[in-house]
């Protein structure tokens, strides 16, 4: 038997999060009164500890372990740090919301910790099996979290839809993986790339597999035509869970897409580029147009999220250009930057919805934002920053994210695609600006001052300001995304 | 056709018919029983591929545990079947078209031309004493140790999710804790009160 | 290898015949004159009160799901048992094979302790 004990060092962060998840589970059940604050603080501490480990082991080298199933590279480390950050902010925002609704049971935080672990596994996956296991760990935790408010029929319905469609998408993904394995004889991504490069395996079978893989990826990203679950789940889930679903998992889905398509199936780039183009156009058009008709802000943000994912795919598909690796890196970097910026904006947007909610009241209609300026000029300004940034108003960070993606598309020769995307984001500007309009020019339905805990107010303010401030130095951020990708692709 | 091929076609035919009945049977209990049959025949086909362990696991886990849960649900639960069938005919054309398209694609791709014996030669016959279970173990517990350990965490997540979503402690039940009952002391039940004697 | 399973196949076929033949025979040989009364559900002479299907306590499913999870866990033990000696005999892997399974079982054991402590196995 020629097998040596694998090197655990690159995966210390995963091991730490896994161990902490189990510890929180076990300790919390033995604590009586203090179980809830313990689980909350311990899950935050887990994220902080994992961030330390990832930060101190980040060396820019690409290393593999567990028989090449696990890859440790700069892109993975940067995305993991972003995931910890997004999850920590999510938990900070959610605490008051969960306490008010008696949902702050320890299992909530345990499931959130395991969802984080699933994302980390996906980000570091270099093997179809680890991609799948990570994805299932993430998805199972999310299904349960959506249904966490057990007495709400709407949440249960949302969880049911999410679960049934998610299971179907996982099935499609697995089927595609089995086709790719059948054609190439390898489950490891670099092995698949090599097998295709050496003309092993039949193209038709590979393409058939690619179609199924793409359907699975598109579902997990929530892009048209696999977007049906997004509005219903965002709307039906408790806002704290919507916040969770709409942020960190997008980073993991981005990493999964990069690993599967660019690392594994780059030889089929011509084909998947066409598919991504279809998905991107559909998402940008449908997301922006459908969002106009929404009166519920969670649904509106869901459709806006669909269109943002379309923009991110625009960056990804622009990476396929003949030969010029610098252009390709720029395009992938712009897509990664877009994903990170979207997460930042989505955190702040759903954070605002949580801020305005209180026990027994969900501020989920756009009307609930009416006259926010009279109630709290500061948070009205923060919401304005978020909406301007999402709409792509110049000099907010969202503008530079859109600009970077569009530049990449133009550089790759897809001028018409860039023009279409700009036109659609002009339509999109309408519904973002409508929120700003009701905040500043309408009378409040409910003039009571905003009651929220100091930590939520503080972090949300920092989040809103970050969206404005990062807009002042976009090029450094994009450069760092490109640099993060340079080692791996 | 040798005997092995005959057995394969027998299992395959039964499996296809059973699977068709799963989706066409009007009675959900019958559908679940046909699914059991489909799992059994799939196990038989895996056995023909010399994947003994997987075949037995399929029967043990799916037929023995999962389908029992399924049957339990469809037999006991008051599902309104008419409401489930609502809209069936209006969705049928689109669903059938997509289904037929998928079947056609699969026939083209998975048919003999790409996975036939000339493109994928038959693997050499296993040596005497070859055990599929052993080979599976050799890979699973060495090369695949990372996904193996992750699998236990996925199972743990499933456990946490199931308990978190369904467990409720009911109030006002009349159940008693036997250990408390046995450990009961006289003082817990009887309180001696000293009262002054009552005079008339 | 497959030859060893031939008796199992025979056994399945005999079992199948044993179940099917009496039904078919009975159907062919016996009189068969159904009417509405004969086919209606029989409940000790009463008209049936209600549908046999009722809302069930979700607790039954919880037990069933926990059973499936631990059933799956056991399935992983069989291939491990076949290969453990070989792993243990390899230089540098002496206890690796043992401890990897102990970690796997340990995680699920913690789950079991949690479920127990949580009261999910109680039947109030």
Image (cartoon, coloured by chain):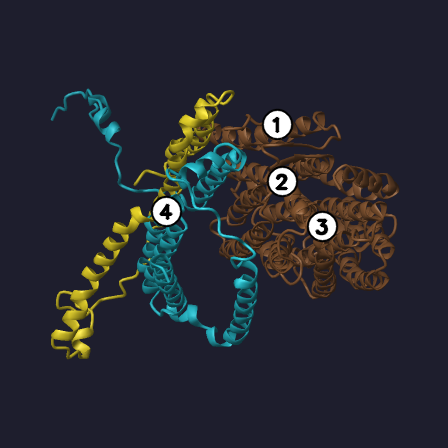
Residue at mark 3 shares a chain with residue at mark 1? yes
The residues bearing labels 4 and 3 have C-alpha atoms spaced at a distance of 38 Å
Image depth: mark 1 or mark 2 in front = 2
Report the residue marked by disc 3.
A266
Badge 3 crowding class, 10 Å Cα cut-off, few under 14, some 14 to 19, many 20 or more, is many
Chain bearing mark 3: A
Horizontal relation, residue A42 to residue A59: left or right = left
- Of the 4 image quadrants, the one containing the N terminus of chain B is bottom left
Q: Earlier in the sequence, mark 2 or mark 3?
A: 2
Percent x, y of residue C106? 43, 29
Report the residue marked by disc 4.
B61
Horizontal relation, residue A48 to residue B117: left or right = right
Q: Residue at x 73, y 66 (%)?
A: A289
Q: Earlier in the sequence, mark 1 or mark 2?
A: 1
The colour one sees for chain B in the rendered image is cyan
Tell me the SS state at disc 3: helix
Q: Which chain is yellow?
A: C
Using the image as rendered, state which of residue B109 and residue A72 is in the foreground.
Answer: B109
Do residues under tags 2 and 3 come within 8 Å of each other at their CB atoms?
Answer: no
Residue A471 visible at all: yes
The residues bearing labels 1 and 4 have C-alpha atoms spaced at a distance of 33 Å
Image depth: mark 1 or mark 4 in front = 4
Chain bearing mark 1: A
Report the residue marked by disc 1.
A12
Residue at mark 4 shares a chain with residue at mark 3? no
Residue A250 visible at all: no
Percent x, y of residue B130? 40, 39
Q: Residue at x 66, y 26 (%)?
A: A53
**Residue A125: image tag:** 2
Image depth: mark 3 or mark 1 in front = 3
């Amino acid at each position: 038997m020629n097998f040596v004990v694998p090197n655990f060092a690159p995966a210390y962060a995963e091991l730490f999060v896994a161990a902490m998840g189990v510890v929180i589970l076990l300790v919390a059940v033995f604590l009586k009164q203090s179980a809830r604050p313990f689980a909350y603080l311990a899950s935050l501490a887990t994220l902080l500890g994992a961030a330390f480990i990832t930060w101190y082991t980040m060396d820019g080298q690409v290393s593999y372990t567990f028989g090449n199933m696990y890859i440790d590279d700069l892109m993975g480390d940067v995305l993991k740090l972003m995931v910890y950050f997004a999850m920590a902010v999510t938990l900070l925002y959610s605490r008051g919301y969960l306490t008010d609704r008696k949902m702050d049971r320890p299992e909530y935080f345990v499931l959130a910790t395991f969802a984080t672990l699933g994302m980390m596994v996906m980000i570091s996956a270099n093997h179809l099996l680890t991609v799948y296991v990570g994805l299932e760990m993430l998805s199972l935790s999310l299904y349960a979290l959506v249904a966490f408010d057990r007495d709400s029929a709407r949440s249960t319905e949302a969880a049911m839809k999410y679960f049934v469609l998610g299971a179907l998408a996982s099935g499609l993904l697995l089927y595609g993986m089995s086709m790719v394995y059948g054609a190439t004889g390898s489950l490891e991504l670099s092995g698949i790339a090599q097998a295709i490069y050496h003309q092993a395996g039949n193209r038709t079978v590979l393409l058939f597999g690619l179609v199924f893989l793409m359907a699975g990826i598109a579902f997990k990203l929530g892009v048209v035509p696999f977007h049906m679950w997004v509005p219903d789940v965002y709307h039906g889930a408790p806002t704290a869970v919507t916040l969770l679903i709409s942020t960190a998992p997008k980073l993991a889905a981005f990493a999964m897409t990069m690993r599967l398509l660019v690392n594994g199936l780059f030889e089929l780039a011509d084909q998947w580029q066409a598919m991504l183009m279809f998905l991107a156009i559909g998402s940008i058009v449908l997301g922006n147009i459908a969002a106009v008709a929404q009166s519920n802000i969670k649904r509106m943000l869901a459709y806006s999220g669909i269109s943002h994912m379309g923009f991110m795919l625009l960056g990804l598909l622009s990476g396929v250009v003949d030969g010029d690796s610098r252009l390709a890196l720029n395009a992938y970097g712009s897509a990664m930057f877009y994903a990170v910026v979207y997460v930042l904006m989505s955190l702040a947007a759903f954070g605002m919805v949580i801020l305005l909610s209180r026990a027994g009241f969900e501020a989920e209609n756009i009307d609930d934002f009416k006259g926010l300026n009279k109630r709290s000029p500061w948070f009205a300004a923060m919401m304005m920053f978020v909406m301007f940034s999402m709409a792509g108003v110049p000099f907010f960070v969202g503008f530079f994210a859109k600009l970077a993606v569009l530049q990449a598309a133009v550089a790759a020769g897809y001028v018409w695609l860039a023009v279409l995307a700009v036109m659609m984001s002009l339509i999109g500007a309408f519904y973002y600006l409508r929120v700003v309009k009701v905040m500043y020019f309408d009378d409040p339905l409910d003039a009571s001052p905003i009651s929220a805990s100091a930590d939520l107010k503080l972090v949300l303010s920092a989040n809103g300001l970050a969206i404005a401030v990062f807009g002042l130095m976009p090029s450094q951020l994009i450069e760092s995304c490109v640099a993060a990708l340079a080692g791996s692709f | 056709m040798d005997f092995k091929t005959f057995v394969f076609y027998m299992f395959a035919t039964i499996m296809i018919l059973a699977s068709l009945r799963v989706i066409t049977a009007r009675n959900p209990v019958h559908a679940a029983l046909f699914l059991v049959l489909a799992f059994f025949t799939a196990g038989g086909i895996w056995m023909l591929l010399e994947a003994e362990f997987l075949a037995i696991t399929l029967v043990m886990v799916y037929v023995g545990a999962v389908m029992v849960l399924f049957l339990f649900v469809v037999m006991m639960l008051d599902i309104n079947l008419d409401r489930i069938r609502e809209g069936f005919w209006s969705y049928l054309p689109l669903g059938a078209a997509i289904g037929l398209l998928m079947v056609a694609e699969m026939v083209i791709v998975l048919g003999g031309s790409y996975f036939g014996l000339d493109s994928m030669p038959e693997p050499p016959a296993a040596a005497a004493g070859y055990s599929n279970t052993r080979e599976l173990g050799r890979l699973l517990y060495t090369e695949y140790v990372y996904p193996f350990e992750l699998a236990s965490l996925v199972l743990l997540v499933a456990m946490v999710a199931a308990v978190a979503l369904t467990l409720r402690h009911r109030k006002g039940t009349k159940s008693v804790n036997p250990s408390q009952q046995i450990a009961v002391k006289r003082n817990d039940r009887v309180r001696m009160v000293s009262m002054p004697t009552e005079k008339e | 290898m497959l030859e060893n399973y031939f008796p199992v196949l025979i056994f399945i076929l005999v079992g199948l015949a044993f179940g099917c033949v009496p039904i078919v025979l009975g159907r062919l040989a016996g009189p068969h004159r159904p009417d509405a009364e004969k086919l209606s559900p029989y409940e000790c002479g009463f008209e049936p009160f209600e549908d046999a299907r009722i809302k069930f306590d979700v607790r039954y499913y919880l037990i069933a799901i926990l059973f499936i999870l631990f059933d799956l866990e056991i399935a992983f033990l069989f291939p491990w048992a076949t290969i453990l000696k070989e792993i243990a005999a390899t230089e540098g892997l002496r206890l690796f094979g043992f401890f990897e399974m102990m970690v796997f079982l340990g995680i699920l054991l913690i789950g079991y302790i949690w479920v127990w402590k949580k009261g999910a196995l109680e039947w109030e």
